[in-house]
Amino acid sequence: MKFIARIALFAVLLAGIATTAAVAQDSGGGPRTSQAYYKIVLGHQQEWLSLYKNYHYPILKQLKAQGLIQSITLYKRDRHHLSPAWDYELQIVWRDKVAQVTGGGSELLHKIFPDWADYEKNEARRWEITEEHWDEDLSPVPVE
């Protein structure tokens, strides 16, 4: 039984190394920008922001402290627009594509949030009041 568990663990580690290597070949090695857009249920913007500050931002701050993220910026709109409709935009500049794909993990979450039930309850609430969400990954296009 221990032998099978060791083989399974070894296979998982190899898969992770292969994924990281494939991502590294595709990354170009430079910083990667990702943007996440959040449309919040009307009247719940402040609640969402409070939940974000307490339950999502600490994760990003830790990834930044580890050098995986170069910058984190949360924007709100100063005017209402019909399309695309969003209340908050989160812009993250990652060290590279490897950091973007492999950063974090469940051990980091449990380290930051030892009260796992509280974390799950509040993240569920943040997503409950998120009406729409989408992500954009941006790649620079050389023009010269």
Image (cartoon, rainbow, N blue to C red):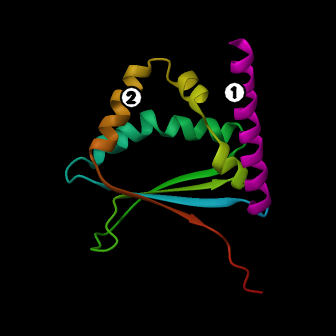
Residue at x 64%, y 39% (from the top left corner): 63
- Which residue is under mark 1? 8
- The quarter in which the N terminus is drawn is top right
Q: Which image quarter: residue 140?
A: bottom right
Task: Identify the residue at the far bottom of this view.
Answer: 144
Q: In the depicted view, which residue is nearer to us: 50 or 9?
A: 9
Residue 120: % across, % down? 39, 28
Amino acid bearing label 2: Glu
Q: Disc 2 and disc 1: Cα gap in Å? A: 28 Å
Q: Is residue 116 within the magenta segment? A: no
Q: Is mark 1 on a helix, strand or loop?
A: helix
Residue 130: % across, % down? 30, 49
Residue 87: % across, % down? 34, 59
Question: Measured along the vertical axis of the image, is residue 100 above or below residue 31?
Answer: above
Q: In the depicted view, which residue is nearer to us: 118 or 20?
A: 20
Q: Marks 1 and 2: in contact by CB < 8 Å?
A: no
Q: Is residue 109 left or right of residue 144?
A: left
Residue at x 31%, y 74% (from the top left corner): 83
- Which residue is under mark 2? 120
Q: Sequence order check: which comes first, mark 2 or mark 1?
A: 1
Crowdedness near tag 2: few (<14), some (14–19) or many (≥20) residues, C-alpha within 10 Å? few
**Magenta-colored segment: predominant secondary structure:** helix
Specify whether residue 11 is in view: yes
Residue at x 37%, y 22% (from the top left corner): 118
Amino acid bearing label 1: Ala
Specify whether residue 29 is in view: no
Crowdedness near tag 1: few (<14), some (14–19) or many (≥20) residues, C-alpha within 10 Å? few
Q: Is residue 11 within the magenta segment? A: yes
Q: Give the range drawn in magenta.
A: 1-27
Question: Measured along the vertical axis of the image, is residue 6 above or below residue 22?
Answer: above
Labels 2, 1: front one:
1
